[in-house]
């Protein structure tokens, strides 16, 4: 599915907040990865646990 840049920003922001608060991640992460980087990687790999209606 193709998202607008606003939808993409909102989704990544929401997921980054979840990750920052301790939610499990669905991609391999390093110790220095920022929540935003992890959320972007989840989105690019299609492993994002967020549904958009």
Image (spheres, grey):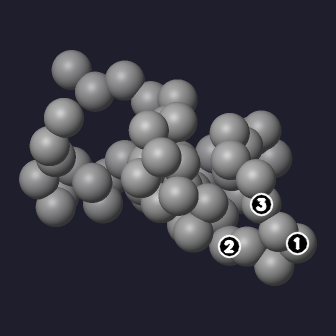
Label 2: element kind: loop
Residue depicted at 48% across the width and 46% down the height: 45
Identify the residue position indicated by label 2 in the image: 34
- Residue in front for this viewpoint, 4 or 42: 42
Mark 3 and mark 2: span between their CA atoms? 9 Å
**Is residue 21 something that shows in the picture?**
no
Residue 46 drawn above or below residue 30:
above
Identify the residue position indicated by label 1 in the image: 31
Label 3: few (<14), some or many (≥20) within 10 Å? Answer: few
- Indicate which disc residue 2 carries: none
Identify the residue position indicated by label 3 in the image: 29
Point out the image quarter for the C terminus: top left
In the rendering, at what x and y percent does residue 37 appear? Answer: 57, 69
Q: Does the CB distance between marks 1 and 3 fall below 8 Å? A: yes
Label 1: element kind: loop
Of labels 1 and 2, the one closer to you: 1
| Left or right side of 15 for 7 | left
Residue 13: which quarter of the image? bottom left
**Is residue 13 something that shows in the picture?**
yes
Residue 25: which quarter of the image? top right
Of labels 3 and 2, the one closer to you: 3
| Left or right side of 34 for 13 | left
Q: Does the CB distance between marks 3 and 2 fall below 8 Å? A: no
State the residue lying farthest toward the right: 31
Point out the image quarter for the N terminus: top left
Residue depicted at 44% across the width and 30% down the height: 50
In the rendering, at what x and y percent does residue 16 appear? Answer: 57, 56
Label 3: element kind: loop
Residue depicted at 61% across the width and 60% down the height: 38
């Amino acid at each position: 599915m193709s998202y607008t840049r606003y939808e993409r920003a909102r989704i990544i922001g929401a997921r980054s907040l979840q990750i920052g608060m301790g939610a499990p991640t669905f991609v391999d992460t390093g110790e220095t990865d920022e929540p935003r980087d992890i959320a972007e990687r989840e989105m690019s790999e299609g492993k994002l646990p967020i549904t958009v209606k």
